[in-house]
Amino acid sequence: MDSLIQRLQALSSAEDFLVFFGLPHDERVVQVNRLHILKRFYQYLHTTEGLAGLDDIEMFKRYRELLARAYDDFVHSNAATERVFKVFQDAGGRQSVPVTSLRDSLAERQRTRREARAA
């Protein structure tokens, strides 16, 4: 019989994990947040102590609880609020470019065009 970890390694999508653990879920929530759910599940697994010493049955129960918690995070919230991925962590998901950088870039492009025309 395969161990729980071996069986989990065969799973590849959030849907696979939710079905494997027998968790009811809304497909619309999963479609929009599948990667966020898996990333949050991974975060919970790596911050929860005492998982390594559990037998497969207890480990299944704890993993199921953590996956349910990860899924629930996105039922009641959204990716921008939860900030699971770096893009959402940096500046609240917004990136900025200094105006001076744009001005310098434009000046460089104009100079390059003038030089090309002169050559």
Image: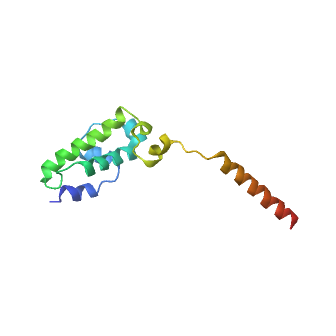
Residue shown at 30% from the left, 41% from the top: 70
46 and 23: which is toward the camera: 46
Rendered location of residue 87, percent (x, y): 47, 47
In the picture, the quarter occupied by the C terminus is: bottom right
**Residue displayed at 31% across by 48% down:** 43
Instruction: State left or right for residue 53 relative to residue 111.
Output: left
Residue 55's place in the image compared with 33, above or below, is below
Q: Residue 115: where, in percent of width, then height?
A: 82, 63
Is 88 situated left or right of 57 in this image? right
How does the figure colour the protein chain or chains? rainbow
Q: How many marks?
A: 0
Looking at the figure, which quarter contains the N terminus?
A: bottom left
Residue at the right extreme of this rendering? 118
Q: Position of residue 13 (x, y in %)?
A: 35, 50
Q: Nearer the viewer, residue 111 or 76?
A: 111
Residue 67 position by quadrant: top left
Whether residue 89 sits left or right of residue 42 in the image: it is right
Question: Where does residue 36 sit, x and y in percent of width and height?
Answer: 38, 44
In this rendering, the answer to whether 75 lies above or below 85 is above
Left or right: residue 57 compared with residue 116: left
Q: Residue furthest bottom?
A: 119
In depth, the one of 96 and 20 nearer the eye is 96
Looking at the image, which residue sits at the far top? 76
Question: At x 22% / y 59%, what residue is drawn?
Answer: 6
Q: Which residue is at the front of the view, 31 or 78?
A: 78
| Image quadrant in which you'd find residue 37 | top left
